[in-house]
Image (cartoon, rainbow, N blue to C red):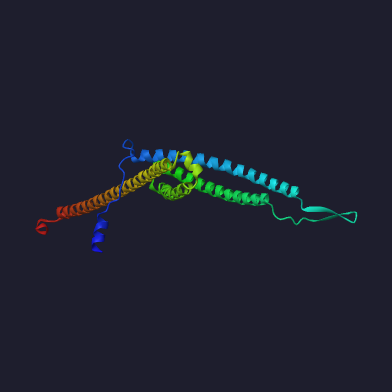
Amino acid sequence: MKKLQCNWRKMKIIRLNNFLFILNLRQGAILIAVHQIALSSFVLIILLVGISHVGEMLTLLHNDMEDEAERRGFFEVKYGGGHLLFHESDLPTSNNQKRFVKAQHLASATVILLYTSTALTAAYLACCIMLLHGAVRCRRAFLLPWIAAACIALLLLLVALALADTYPCLVNLFGGHNLYHFGCAIFVLTFVYAISAVTSFALETSAVAAARGASCAENNDERGERLLLLDHAAHSSLLSAAQLKRMSSCTRTQFV
């Protein structure tokens, strides 16, 4: 246990000193915020367009199901004793109706997924705006929401990339599994680097704020000491003036 504690104390937090070896951390955080705001806004617009199209798709699907029910016929016509007899059809469910039911369930799941993704993207966009404000004003409190949201987004991204690997149509867009895995690795590492840069900037901002607080406290202490010394000096000067006045009014014998 003692060795583990010693090793834990020797560990240091890995921090970045600059962004891309050219910009400082503040400039890097501003650049990341602008990039993420543009990207999340683009994704949000696509999701809103997708929601509108899914609504139209559900309407068309409902109309097609009604047309199929009418073509199939809920009532059959039979002749009996020279009269027309109407009764409800007892035909079994067709394969086309089964497909319609599956399509309806798939469309409902797509609507839920789109609404959830839209809400998460809007929340992430708000965190990106807070990141931009915190980077411009150098305020650590506005950086923390984006760091937390980015960590959650990173986990969701890893899950989405793992699920997309099971769909050959998506993998073929990248030219195969190897290129798909390479592209995913670069994208994930870039996102991790951005999180590290913003985290380092937050730590730097907190360190600067702590240093400013310490300097203000030292200045206050020095000011208090100066006031105390001035008070003592004034008090001693008053005493010496009173003593001099008393000494000047006394006789020689009293002075002795």
Residue toward you, 147 or 88: 88
Task: Tell me if 88 is positioned left or right of 253 in this view.
Answer: right
Percent of width and height locating residue 121: 50, 46
Q: Is residue 177 above or below residue 8?
A: above
Quarter holding residue 253: bottom left
What residue do we see at 38% from left, 47% from top? Answer: 140
Q: Is residue 131 left or right of residue 118?
A: left
Q: Nearer the viewer, residue 181 or 40?
A: 181
Comparing 245 with 174, the one in front is: 174
Question: Going by the picture, which residue comes out furthest to the top?
Answer: 22
Furthest-bottom residue in view?
1
Give the image location of residue 248, x and y in percent: 15, 52
Horizontal and vertical percent for residue 172?
48, 40
Q: Nearer the viewer, residue 77 or 252?
A: 77
Quadrant housing the C terminus: bottom left
Q: How many marks?
A: 0
For the point 49% across and 42% down, which residue is it? 170
Q: Residue at x 27, y 57 (%)?
A: 8
- The N terminus, quarter of image: bottom left
Residue 235: x, y in percent? 22, 54
